[in-house]
């Protein structure tokens, strides 16, 4: 008969179950700082694990030819939340202490001459438990990863709809569960997905985004990829860092345009950045020469053509109204220059001024609006803004 199956040895191990459990818990309490930091309830769960481990060893010790009980059965003695409170490394520390305790008491437990057999049995059992624990944590990580991916998709969808507006507590709680810090500026980047964007590629993109910015969320909506980036510094630092992160992530999107929404002060306003970015993505086809990535506000004229009322208001507010208020014939000069085929001489003749005067006034337009009338693309932006402003002015007069 194998030594581990010796009835007297088995009886001795069974009777020592309470002793082994108590000794194990004393060692755990004295040696493991993380255990002392747990709540009272969580510490009681660890006690249940230790007791379950000793009991499972005793049951296996009665019939060592059958496979040892795995960690799954041992963890069944404690709530599933415990796997979130202690890591795999912590679990292996518990196993190590349990082995050392049994070894310490092996002289008292085993019959004379069988001490080595008992130590070998517990080492064999602990090895199986360690492998089983690794499998338990691997499965938990896989499930948690799938759940996190679904939760992340729901959170991104809520941000796109503007559910964060008004500081929705439940949404913030979900974002916190995904590791979002909840502070700093935010921007949204949208583009197409690579084909196919499987779980591995998505996880890689998520890691890259989180390395580039303080906070990051990734969502896939059909063939669109949405990345939400958040910062944690001051306003200027956040804006520069987020824009740099968005630029760095552009190659990870699929073919076609990649649009960066405007930087907004907080996650509560992320929907504004998202809406601008999505509107820009819908309108980007109208500007085939657009850079990649392109800022949503660089697509304002194209967005107006798709019926984007926000882009219309922005163009009028940022270009037409300041020129209207500037006086000094600046707006009239811009209109004359654009209306004569962007010719300085033709505009000068129509306005009865010297071409240098037209050139000077156009420089004022660039200073006031940030768009240069002498640049082909920016003059188009100004022409759309001028047309919108004049249409709105006639409506007001009516």
Image (spheres, rainbow, N blue to C red):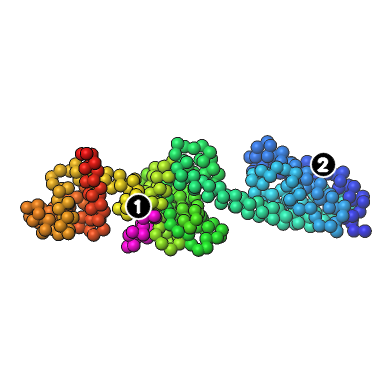
Residue situated in front as seen by the camera: 216 or 82:
216
Q: Does the magenta portion include 338? A: no
Residue situated in front as seen by the camera: 129 or 215:
215
Does 252 sit left or right of 293 as displayed?
right
Rounded to the nearest angstrom, the CA distance separating label 2 from label 1 is 75 Å
Q: Secondary structure at mark 2?
A: helix
Counting residues from the N terminus, which is met first, the one under dot 2 or under dot 1?
2
Q: How many numbered marks have been drawn onto this rendered protein structure?
A: 2
Image coordinates for residue 215, horizontal then vertical, percent: 47, 48
Judge whether 270 appears above or below 209 on screen. above
Residue situated in front as seen by the camera: 353 or 97:
353
Part of the protein shown in magenta: 281-296
Q: Which mark is residue 306?
A: 1
**Residue at the extreme front of the image, as rendered:** 398
Residue at the (56%, 47%) spot, across then down:
151
Q: Which mark is residue 116?
A: none
Image coordinates for residue 338, horizontal then vertical, percent: 18, 55
Q: Which mark is residue 18?
A: 2
Judge whether 206 appears above or below 35 on screen. below
Residue at the (19%, 50%) spot, across then down:
365
Image coordinates for residue 75, horizontal then vertical, percent: 73, 47
Q: Is residue 211 visible?
A: no
Q: Is residue 118 visible?
A: yes
Does 319 sit left or right of 24 as displayed?
left
Residue at the (13%, 58%) spot, across then down:
344
Does 271 sit left or right of 8 as displayed?
left
The quarter of the image holding the C terminus is top left
Residue at the (20%, 58%) spot, across then down:
374
Q: Secondary structure at mark 1?
A: loop
């Amino acid at each position: 008969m194998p030594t581990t199956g010796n009835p007297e040895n088995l009886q001795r191990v069974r009777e020592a179950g309470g002793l082994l459990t108590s000794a194990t818990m004393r060692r755990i309490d004295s040696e493991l700082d993380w255990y002392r930091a747990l709540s009272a309830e969580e510490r009681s769960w660890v006690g249940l694990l230790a007791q379950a481990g000793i009991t499972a060893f005793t049951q296996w010790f009665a019939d060592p030819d059958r496979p040892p009980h795995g960690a799954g059965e041992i963890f069944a003695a404690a709530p599933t939340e415990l796997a979130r409170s202690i890591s795999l490394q912590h679990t292996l520390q518990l196993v190590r202490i349990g082995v050392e305790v049994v070894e310490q008491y092996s002289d008292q437990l085993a019959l004379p001459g069988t001490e080595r057999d008992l130590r070998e049995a517990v080492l064999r059992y602990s090895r199986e438990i360690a492998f089983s624990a690794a499998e338990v944590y691997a499965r938990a990580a896989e499930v948690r990863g799938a759940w996190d991916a679904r939760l992340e998709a729901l959170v991104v969808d809520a941000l796109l709809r503007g559910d964060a507006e008004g500081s929705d507590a439940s949404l913030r709680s979900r974002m916190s569960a995904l590791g979002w810090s909840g502070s700093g500026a935010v921007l949204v980047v949208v583009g197409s997905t690579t084909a196919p964007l499987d779980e591995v590629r998505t996880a890689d993109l998520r890691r890259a985004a989180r390395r580039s910015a303080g906070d990051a969320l990734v969502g896939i909506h059909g063939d669109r990829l949405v990345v939400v980036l958040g910062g944690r510094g001051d306003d200027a630092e956040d804006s520069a860092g987020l824009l740099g992160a968005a630029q760095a992530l552009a190659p990870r999107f699929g073919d076609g345009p990649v649009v960066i929404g405007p930087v907004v002060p907080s996650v509560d306003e992320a929907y504004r950045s998202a809406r601008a970015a999505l509107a820009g993505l819908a309108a980007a086809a109208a500007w085939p020469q657009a850079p990649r990535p392109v800022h949503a506000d660089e697509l304002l004229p194209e967005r107006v053509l798709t019926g984007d009322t926000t882009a219309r208001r922005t163009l009028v507010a940022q270009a037409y109204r300041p020129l209207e208020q500037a006086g000094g014939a600046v707006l009239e000069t811009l209109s004359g220059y654009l209306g004569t085929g962007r010719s300085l001489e033709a505009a000068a003749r129509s306005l009865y001024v010297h071409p240098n005067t037209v050139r000077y006034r156009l420089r004022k337009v660039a200073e006031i609006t940030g768009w240069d009338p002498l640049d082909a693309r920016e003059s188009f932006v100004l022409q759309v803004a001028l047309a919108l402003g004049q249409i709105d002015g006639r409506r007001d007069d009516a």
